[in-house]
């Protein structure tokens, strides 16, 4: 299971309709609704500044939250829509969906690395580059992995670790169909420079004698 599902604190909104929503905005709040999960829709208000900060951080609509509303049981939710002002592009309303344990959702899962201490490529001075520090997976709400792990214990310089080499948690699958790269092990800059110089010398040695004479 995911180690830390962030809390999202909200206030129950009294009253519905455009009048209540406008009042909420005047009070520095953003109105919203929580729906689904075999329960009645729950009108809520979210502090504008906190919501805007989370939206700017990115991936708000693919983050699972533990919603806390006073007087109600905590519930896992995911954002399904953010309505914005047509001119100012600021949030004016947010829709959240309650999740059942069997609900399938898209989430970005962090990547851990194993085997760095024994990797032959890294021992030779290779540089590990995480092309994707996070991978978007389709997971079930009841079985969200804390992370996925790539193994570089046998990786050499020049090797790439792709998603097909990762043992994904049961019930999880990537949102991308192709076998994409997660990490690479490249030669250190000093070694690359030496190899480039050696390649240039080899090409010069292979120039036909006639060409060399013409150049002279």
Image (cartoon, rainbow, N blue to C red):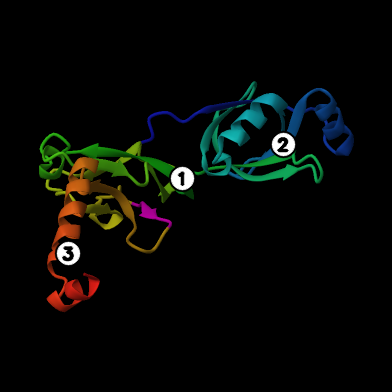
Q: How many marks?
A: 3
Q: Which residue is mark 2?
A: 32
Q: Which residue is mark 1?
A: 107
Lower position in the chain sequence, tag 2 or tag 1:
2
User: How far apart are the alpha carbons under marks 3 and 2?
Assistant: 69 Å
User: How far apart are the alpha carbons under marks 2 and 1?
Assistant: 22 Å
Marks 3 and 1: which is nearer the front?
A: 3
Marks 3 and 2: which is nearer the front?
A: 3
The N terminus appears in which quarter of the rendering? Answer: top left
Residue at far right of view: 19
Magenta range is 171-175
Q: Decide if residue 76 is on the left or right side of residue 158.
A: right
Image coords of residue 140 (percent x, y): 42, 47
Asked if the stretch drawn in magenta spans residue 172, the answer is yes
The numbered dot on residue 204 is 3
Asked if the stretch drawn in magenta spans residue 130, the answer is no
User: How far apart are the alpha carbons under marks 3 and 1?
Assistant: 52 Å
Lower position in the chain sequence, tag 3 or tag 1:
1
Image coords of residue 135 (percent x, y): 39, 47
């Amino acid at each position: 299971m995911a180690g830390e599902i962030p809390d999202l604190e909200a206030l129950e909104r009294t009253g519905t309709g455009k009048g209540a929503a406008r009042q909420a905005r005047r009070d520095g709040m953003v109105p919203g609704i929580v729906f689904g999960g075999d329960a009645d829709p729950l009108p809520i208000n979210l502090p504008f500044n906190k919501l805007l900060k989370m939206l700017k951080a990115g991936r708000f609509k693919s983050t699972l939250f533990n919603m806390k509303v006073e007087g109600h049981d905590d519930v896992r939710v995911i954002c399904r829509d953010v309505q914005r002002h047509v001119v100012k592009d600021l949030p004016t309303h947010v829709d959240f969906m309650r999740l059942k344990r069997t609900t399938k959702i898209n989430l970005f899962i962090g990547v851990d690395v194993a085997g760095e201490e024994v990797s032959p490529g890294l021992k030779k001075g290779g540089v590990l580059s995480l092309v994707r520090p996070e991978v978007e997976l389709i997971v079930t709400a009841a079985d969200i992995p804390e992370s996925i792990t790539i193994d570089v214990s046998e990786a050499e310089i020049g090797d790439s670790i792709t998603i097909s080499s990762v043992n994904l948690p049961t019930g999880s699958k990537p949102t991308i169909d192709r076998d994409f790269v997660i990490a690479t092990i490249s030669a250190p800059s000093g070694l690359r420079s030496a190899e480039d110089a050696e390649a240039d010398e080899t090409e010069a040695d292979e120039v036909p004698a006639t060409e060399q004479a013409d150049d002279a």
